[in-house]
Amino acid sequence: MTEEVEIKEGLQGVYIAKSSISKVNGEEGKLYYRGYKIEDLAEKSTYEEVCYLILYGKLPNSKELDSFSNELKKERILSDETIEIIKRMSKKAHVLDTLRTAMSSISADDPEPYSSEEEKNVHKAVKIIAKTATISAAIGRVRKGKDIIPPDDSLGHAKNFLYMLTGEKPDNKKAKLMDVMFILHAEHSSNASTFAALVACSTLADIYSAVVAGEAALKGPLHGGADEAAVKMMQAIGEPGNTEKYINEVLASKEKIMGFGHRVYKAYDPRARILKKYLDEIDGNGEEEVNKLVKIALNTEKIMVDRLGKSHGIWPNVDFFAGPLYMHLGIEPELFDVIFSSSRTVGWCAHVIEYWRNNKLFRPLEEYDGALDLEYKPINER
Ligand code: SDX
């Protein structure tokens, strides 16, 4: 008599470890990185400072921040092999497939990809964060048939990313918005891609392999791919006046509205609330297409919050408003997921480093419900 087992689909509600990196309060819609409110970090910090906070567990003083920022700058450059991979793959492969392959090539340049020493892994994390941003921008350039632009070390992380991607140094307003996008996507506890990275590192695979696992998981539209899917939905709606009809049809066919709902947040995602403020700022002073997308996004939000917010706990998440804001920065929808991945690299690395302090191989169970002890018949009797 086999005992009754309880299967937790998708590991819903299952705690896998203790962590002090971020706190996601799903009931109240609150998010903290190392104890600091996401609202304060988005308004007052920079991605470099947030990376230091997430990796080292405390805000840096100015000397520490300068040294950390300089290490990031030093690591931005890509090898010829990595550039060759980006050039060969970017015209035909999905951006995250190219990113994953380029990431693997970075580990080939490291004589000791796996280390048991935390300090070495933190420096590997800095290298991965810096190079992933350069790879992401390079993929964006090659996709459009343009030359890759090398990093400009006079610029901070966000400004340099936009410069490498667009060829122009952005004004401070756009650079701040890019910085906020990086900060808001940097870390989010044990989401699917971070969990994938943890499963990989729990076998004592190296930190590069763990990041590649995270990138693979992030690709799907239920996770990192939602921001691109959400903006493609807005483009399909076409005109603000079509919004309600479109939403009704999607909901009637039991499909999902991308950028809404969350496994943990049963309240408004605090990151979406921050992004909505920036959306209000560009409303009307973006390009024609972006202005229309902003109106459609705000219409969709109102309909969905009225329809499924309080009653079903389905609220906008970080991916919903991101699209029109990225397009305002000159970023095409197909590139959104790489930017999410570039930003989240710090979260993946920090969780891997923290998990290794008390490593335990992940090996969950399945309840077998197939046949047993079948007789093996020779092929001419089957
Ligand atoms: C991210 O985990 C993280 O922290 C992720 C993330 C991070 O920073 O790492 O926050 C980033 O990935 C945000 C989520 C991006 N994905 C999307 O926006 C895709 C659309 N959302 C849904 O696919 C869904 O909400 C999930 C996958 C995000 C969460 O789904 P769950 O918790 O597995 O819940 P479910 O799919 O079982 O839905 C429960 C019910 C269902 O209805 P019933 O079958 O019970 O009648 O809610 C409905 C769903 O149909 N529902 C939706 C909906 N999301 C859930 N209905 C319409 N539109 C939606 N978006």
Image (cartoon, rainbow, N blue to C red):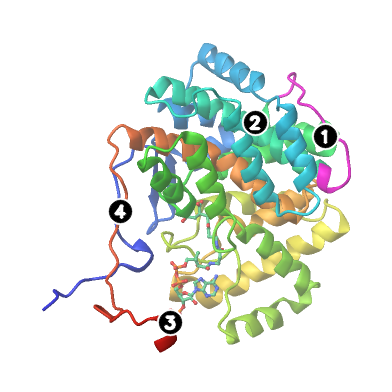
Residue type of the residue flagged with mark 4: Arg
Q: Please name the residue shown 49% across and 51% down the image.
A: 193
Position in image of residue 184 (x %, y %): 56, 44
Quadrant occupied by the N terminus: bottom left
Q: Mark 1 points at which residue?
A: 148
The residue to which callout 3 is attached is 379
Q: Is the magenta stretch mostly helix, strand or loop?
A: loop
Q: Name the residue under label 4.
A: 363
What is the three-letter code of the residue carrying label 2?
Lys
Q: Is the Cβ of the residue at disc 2 closer than 8 Å to that at disc 3?
A: no
Using the image as rendered, state which of residue 44 and residue 235 is in the foreground: 235
- Residue that badge 2 annotates: 131
- The answer to which of marks 3 and 4 sits earlier in the sequence is 4
Q: In which quarter of the image is the C terminus?
A: bottom left
Q: Which region shows up in magenta?
A: 142-155
Q: Which element is circle 1 on?
A: loop
Q: Distance between the residues labelled 2 and 4?
A: 32 Å
**How far is mark 3 from mark 4, CA to CA?**
35 Å
The alpha-carbon separation of the residues under discs 3 and 1 comes to 57 Å
**Disc 2 to disc 3, how far (Cα)?**
54 Å
Q: Who's the residue at 42% across and 20% down the image?
A: 119
**Which is closer to the viewer, label 2 or label 3?**
3
CB within 8 Å, label 2 to label 1 = no
How many angstroms separate mark 1 from mark 4 (CA)?
Answer: 42 Å
Q: Sequence-wise, which precedes: disc 1 or disc 4?
A: 1
Q: What element carries label 2?
A: helix
Amino acid carrying mark 1 in the image: Ile
For label 4, the SS is loop
Label 2 – label 1 distance at C-alpha: 14 Å
